[in-house]
Image: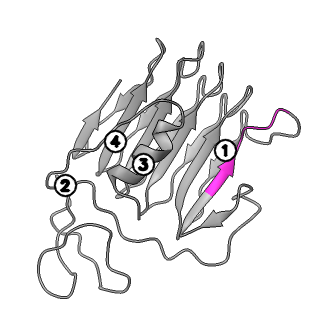
């Protein structure tokens, strides 16, 4: 599990540094963990079982890397979907389904990147979408995890996040933008919503 500082390293790659401010997750008072694996943040109660705090997510179990999705590999429970290639890039206009059991990093580097794609984050774990090149996340849709943290990083490249949209889950939901194109965000249930 990666906390705000871990995400800072990824976001710094495009010049963005966004840190989450944590508080109690609204609407998730009933969510507890069974202790098998615990979770990445603080817990209340005994044995690592307790209500989830804003910015906390369970540690992803990882496992065998589903390379058909995680074409950038898997390390420490993180699946990397690499959409930065300009030749044979399967991402533009497609539906990218992050695998269960992993945090998910979707790297939309060079054009066409992830333009027009729908990114479905894992139900439980963190999701990070990094948009670095011109139009690489134009008209992208990010469906955030129900309980994982969700980040969309937009560089200063022209049109990078033009028409992009995030639908937040219950946890921290953040968009960081260096340029002048900003995604729209549906933050109805998010414990923290931080738009550009």
Mark-to-mark CA distance, 4 and 1: 21 Å
In the orientation shown, which residue stands out farthest toward the right? 87
* Residue 144 visible to an observer of this rendering: no
Mark-to-mark CA distance, 1 and 3: 24 Å
Mark-to-mark CA distance, 2 and 1: 28 Å
Disc on res. 173: 4
Q: Residues within 10 Å of mark 2 (few under 14, many from 20)?
A: many
Q: Quadrant of residue 53?
A: bottom left
Image position of 194 (left or right of 125) = left
Q: Which residue is mark 2?
A: 25
Q: Nearer the viewer, mark 1 or mark 3?
A: 3
Q: Secondary structure at mark 2?
A: loop
Q: Where does the magenta region start and end?
A: 80-86
Going from N to C along the chain, the mark reached first, 1 or 3, is 3
Membership of 81 in magenta stretch: yes
Please say if the residues under marks 2 and 1 sit with CB atoms less than 8 Å apart: no
Mark-to-mark CA distance, 2 and 3: 19 Å
Quadrant position of the C terminus in the picture: top left
Mark-to-mark CA distance, 4 and 2: 12 Å
Q: Nearer the viewer, residue 90 or 75?
A: 75
């Amino acid at each position: 599990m990666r906390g705000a500082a871990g995400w800072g390293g990824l976001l710094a790659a495009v010049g963005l540094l966004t840190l989450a401010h944590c508080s109690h997750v609204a609407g998730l008072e009933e969510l507890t963990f069974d202790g098998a694996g615990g979770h990445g943040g603080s817990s209340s109660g005994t044995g690592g079982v307790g209500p989830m705090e804003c910015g906390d997510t369970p540690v992803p179990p990882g496992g065998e890397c589903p390379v058909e999705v995680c074409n950038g590999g898997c390390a420490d429970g993180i699946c990397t979907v690499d959409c930065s290639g300009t030749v044979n890039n399967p991402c533009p206009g497609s539906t990218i389904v992050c695998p269960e059991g992993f945090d998910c990093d979707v790297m939309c580097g060079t054009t066409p990147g992830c333009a027009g794609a729908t990114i479905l984050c894992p139900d439980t774990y963190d999701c990070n979408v990094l948009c670095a090149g011109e139009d690489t996340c134009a008209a992208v849709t990010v469906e955030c995890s129900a309980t994982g943290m969700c980040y969309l990083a937009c560089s200063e490249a022209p049109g990078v996040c033009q028409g992009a949209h995030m639908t937040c889950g219950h946890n921290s939901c953040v968009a960081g933008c260096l340029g002048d194109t900003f995604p729209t965000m549906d933050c109805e249930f998010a414990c923290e919503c931080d738009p550009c």
